[in-house]
Amino acid sequence: MKKSIKDWFSEWDEDKINLTELTANQGNENLIKEEKKEHNISELVELKQKELSRAGKIYPVLAALLCVVIIYFMLMTVSGLPKFGQADNPTNNEVVERYVEKGMEETGAVNVVAGVILDYRAFDTLGESHVLFTAVIAVFTLLLADKEEKETIEEGQIMKQDNILRNTAIFIVPLTVLFGIYVILNGHLGPGGGFSGGAIIGAAFIIYAMAFGFSGIEKFLTLKTFRIIVLCALLFYSGAKCYSFFCGANELHSIFGPGTPGMILSSGLILPLNIAVGIVVACTMYGFYSIFKRGRI
Amino acid sequence: MEIFECTLLILLVVGAIATVSSKNLMISMIIFMAYSVVMSVIWIILKAPDLSVTEAAVGAGISSILMFMTIRKLRDIKKEKNEEKH
Amino acid sequence: MLEFIWTNRIQCVSVILFAIGFSTLLLHRNLMKKIIGLNIMDTATYLFLTSIGMIEGRLAPIIQNGDTDVSKYVNPLPAGLVLTGIVVSVSVTAVMLALTIRLYKSYHTLNLDEIYLKAQEEQEEEP
């Protein structure tokens, strides 16, 4: 057992990845070149290899030098900054005052950060959700499995019995999902919010998929449902923000008032938006894992 | 409290250097995970609990898992290639 | 200078981390290491931003007992900005890892120099 773990680690020595491949490839190239009866080119490959090894020696030295130079110049720049942790620093200006003093009254969120990112600056967060969605599309385009590949992956899917992982997962997964839901629903009352809670739920799905295979999660999350869920969440987010922009610009009374700060059903649109963002993030994180593992969702 | 903070900061620098200079990809990824956890503790010291929760879930959890999956996938590709050769 | 480094130690550490990440991103040959370097750079920037908003002896920006006095809480804005950044950095990492897998599939190495050489050879062979 000890040996196998050691092998598993040593398989990923950096030099091994690069050099074994290089020598193997060099052999191939030599064969081709012998067929063509051109001896010069094998010499050329050797020369290139020499160049590579020389570059490999130069790079760490250059890196250390560059590191020192950057540290020097940036420390000089940092030394012009105001003292750390003082209340009268220029960053702590009237904007912050406004956010902290009026934030709870206007948005109804006890957590000022949640009020800022999901109410005052909700447009940023909308863009962020779309960045996640675009990333999933890009990864999907890059790693979509071919038909032949798919079959080999399916064959490799038969999970080894791993008792430790399975028995731990039975306890951990429900607790993790519960904690994620708590973090999402608690976003406007304390630390947390859509992103962290969604990532926690996504991590729970990943643990489940690692322990018991994908068949359990496929019952409720296939590519079709993934598309529908993410699209609905993003559309809901855009629609809700359109409504609140419309109300704010025309000075109408929004039907989602701030409510009583501190209650779970308060702070207007922040709670539904948190849920929408959480759903997008959870699906996206699981989607990343699934695409990396087997080439499809 | 200051000693605690300084220990964490030194751990950060050491972790970053170890991550970068380790010859083994697997080990450097594990150290990177530890680096993220230390970072999330520092964010509690800096009075930003939202960031701490997010970093612990995203930095130490998801992105490390993605890196491990990538490594595994690379190994599979390498194995396939070796089998083809023999 | 030394006194300054002691008072602004978090910012100094973030600068050092940034330099380490940057030189790795620029000068390491291994693609996975480059990605890790970019991640380190990301966290260094976030650390710097968050440390700007910190005020000593104050509470986290979660209003307690309805007390909205600004002199009791730290600056909430950098935390909000960084929260966006963390999630974006994860999506960037995922896209870069996917690109790495594609590169490894076609060139069977993670070394950027070798990839470059092989790509050059392919280009010479094609016409």
Image: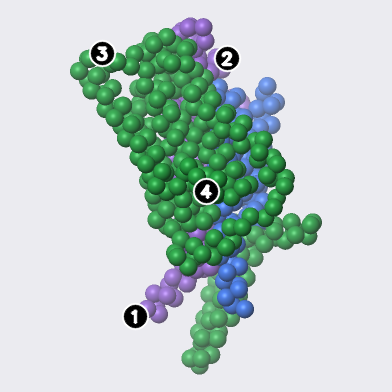
Chain colours: A green, B blue, C purple
Q: Earlier in the sequence, mark 4 or mark 3?
A: 3
Chain letter belonging to callout 4 = A
Q: Amino acid at mark 4?
A: Tyr
To the question of a shared chain for discs 3 and 2, the answer is: no
Above-or-below relation of A172 to A34:
above
| Residue marked by disc 3 | A253
Residue C92 location (% of width, % of height)? 45, 46
Rendered residue at 39%/27% (across/down): A273
Which residue in the rendered view is the most extreme toward the bottom? A37
For marks 1 and 3, give the one nearer the viewer.
3
Q: CA distance from mark 3 to mark 2?
A: 39 Å
- Helix, strand or loop at label 2? It is loop
Report which residue position mark 4 lands on: A289
Residue C40 figure quarter: top right
Which residue type carries mark 1? Answer: Pro
Q: Which mark, by number, is residue C127?
A: 1
Task: Specify the amino acid type for callout 2.
Answer: Gly
Q: Is label 4 in contact with label 3 (beta carbons under 8 Å)?
A: no
- The type of residue carrying mark 3 is His
Classify mark 1: residues with Cα within 10 Å, few (<14), some (14-19) or many (20+): few
Q: Residue at x 55, y 14 (%)?
A: C58
Q: Residues within 10 Å of mark 2 (few under 14, many from 20)?
A: few
Which secondary structure, mark 4? helix
Q: In the image, B34: left or right of A35?
A: right
**In the image shown, does C97 or B35 lie closer to the viewer?**
C97
- Distance in Å between CA atoms under marks 1 and 3: 69 Å
Cα–Cα gap, marks 4 and 3: 43 Å
Where the N terminus of chain A falls, by quadrant? bottom right
